[in-house]
Amino acid sequence: MKYSNEDLDVIPAQKRTWSTWNYAALWISMSLCIPTYMIASSLIEGGMNWWQAILTVFLGNAIVVIPMVLNGDAGARYGINFPVFSRASFGVLGANIPALLRAIVACGWFGIQTWIGGYAIYQAIKLWVPAIGTLPLMFPSSWGLETGPAITFLAFWGINMLVVYLGIESIRKLLLFKAVFLPLAAISLLFWALSVANGLGPILSQPSKFETSGEFFKFFFPALTGMVGFWATLSLNIPDFTRYARSQRAQVMGQILGLPPSMTLFAFIGVVVTSATTLVYGKTIWDPVDLAGRFDSPLLVSFAMLAVAISTLATNIAANIVSPANDFANLAPSKIDFKKGGYITGVLGALIFPWKLIADPNGYIYTWLIAYSSLLGPIGGILIADYFFIRKKHLVVEELYSESGRYWYRGGFNPNALWALVLGILPNVPGFLTTIKVIPQDSVPALISGLYHYAWFVGFAVSASVYFILQAKSRGSTAPVL
């Protein structure tokens, strides 16, 4: 078919073998990654105490698991992936818009993970070959990129592309290594923190830097939006995974049991270790790669950095290659397959300057996490409003691949979905522009710019409401549109 290929076809019932444990294991594996540690420790750097940071992480993941489970329903019920599911609401061709928005975000995450892995390799090499840290600059100073880290970044990027070339099966052993080693490495870091800080007491007694409740909530709500935004990508493309589910219960229980607890537990380790660095070094070190580079033993540092690189490679392929490859394939099913989609992801991921995105916690939360959540929240609102409230979970799968079916709308696009998407994004634009300093802060009313702190929630609510009203009106009633 014109709008299908092997990666976009329906998964037949006999091949849907994933159990509750498979989904729980998937989330445990993906949660145990360096960005999870960094997002939790960035809250400490931002001023929270330990319990405020842990509560923020838990609430964010408890919230995001709701759209995760809801969007996963269609994958488990019909065996379709995210781009095909999007065709029901956006149109057969219009689905390329949410797919590409989601794919571009995945490219950003790919770049961040690749930078982390490459920098870990740089830290290890620098211990044995110090000259790599003094190489003359090869790039413009405005790029903020030293030559040594750039070399290892490009080398690690090449390893990622090699895995794409070899195929997804080549990552299985790396995922097994990660599942065994990274929890051990995290626990080792926790014991280190407890040892150097003389127990949990000094760590947990560190006060919040916020003197008033107003200061706290000014940081809390953007941080909570950032926590939701952390997995906002997967909350959309979760059908890419749930289409392999044995049952609806498997994907629901697996995600509930796997995501919030594992994120919170690993975040707790990150918070404890980061708090310990304040006591030991006199400043907060929120990057675990930077922290490991301060240890005394070259062999220990080298081993830790190698482990970070391998586990990052495994996470990158599972979380940041599979889905955008499907999204790019949806753009031109006859021309783009998994490998080509992976190469596109790799190139775009390098071009976003990921080292700048994670240079400081404020940029990480306010510029990166919240910015893309303002794009993905509206998409999630439209998908859920269409599937649950308009169609009552009823899809005609054959017509999702057809130009003559009900999902073709007007020339392959559903104008109602496009209007809802634009109107959901619009309220967050002024706040984003003031955050990146394109326009002065005082040129926008505080009430308007403040909406950006709730970007995912605002976009989700506005787009879902607008889409439901427009779609119901276009059919003449609010009756289910089958």
Image (tube, rainbow, N blue to C red):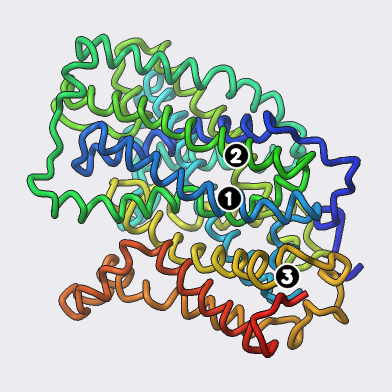
Identify the residue under disc 1: 68
**Can you identify the residue that label 3 sits on?**
87
Whether residue 141 is visible here, answered yes or no, is no
Q: Going by the picture, which residue comes out furthest to the left?
A: 211
Disc 3 to disc 1: CB gap under 8 Å: no
Q: Residues within 10 Å of mark 1 (few under 14, many from 20)?
A: many
Asked whether disc 2 touches disc 1, contact meaning CB atoms under 8 Å apart, the reply is: yes
Is 148 on the left-hand or right-hand side of 251?
left
Residue 389, given in percent of the width and then of the height, sits at: 63, 69
- Residue 88 lies, in percent from the top left, at 73, 70
Among the two numbered marks 3 and 2 on one chain, the one whose residue lies closer to the N terminus: 3
Residue 255: assigned label = 2
Q: Earlier in the sequence, mark 3 or mark 1?
A: 1
| x and y percentages locating residue 145 in the rendered image | 36, 47
| Neighbourhood count class around disc 2 (C-alpha, 10 Å): few under 14, some 14–19, many 20 upward | many
Q: Which quarter of the image is occupied by the N terminus?
A: bottom right
Q: Looking at the image, which is closer to me, 386 or 313?
A: 386
Q: Nearer the viewer, mark 3 or mark 1?
A: 1
Question: Which amino acid, mark 3?
Answer: Arg
Q: Left or right? Give the position of 193 relative to 129.
A: left
Could you tell which of marks 2 and 1 lies nearer the N-terminus? Answer: 1
Q: Please tell me how crowded label 3 is: few (under 14), some (14-19), or many (20+) other residues with Cα within 10 Å.
A: many
Does residue 461 sit above or below 195 in this rendering?
below
Q: Nearer the viewer, residue 161 or 441?
A: 441
> Residue placed at 37% from the left, 76% from the top?
427
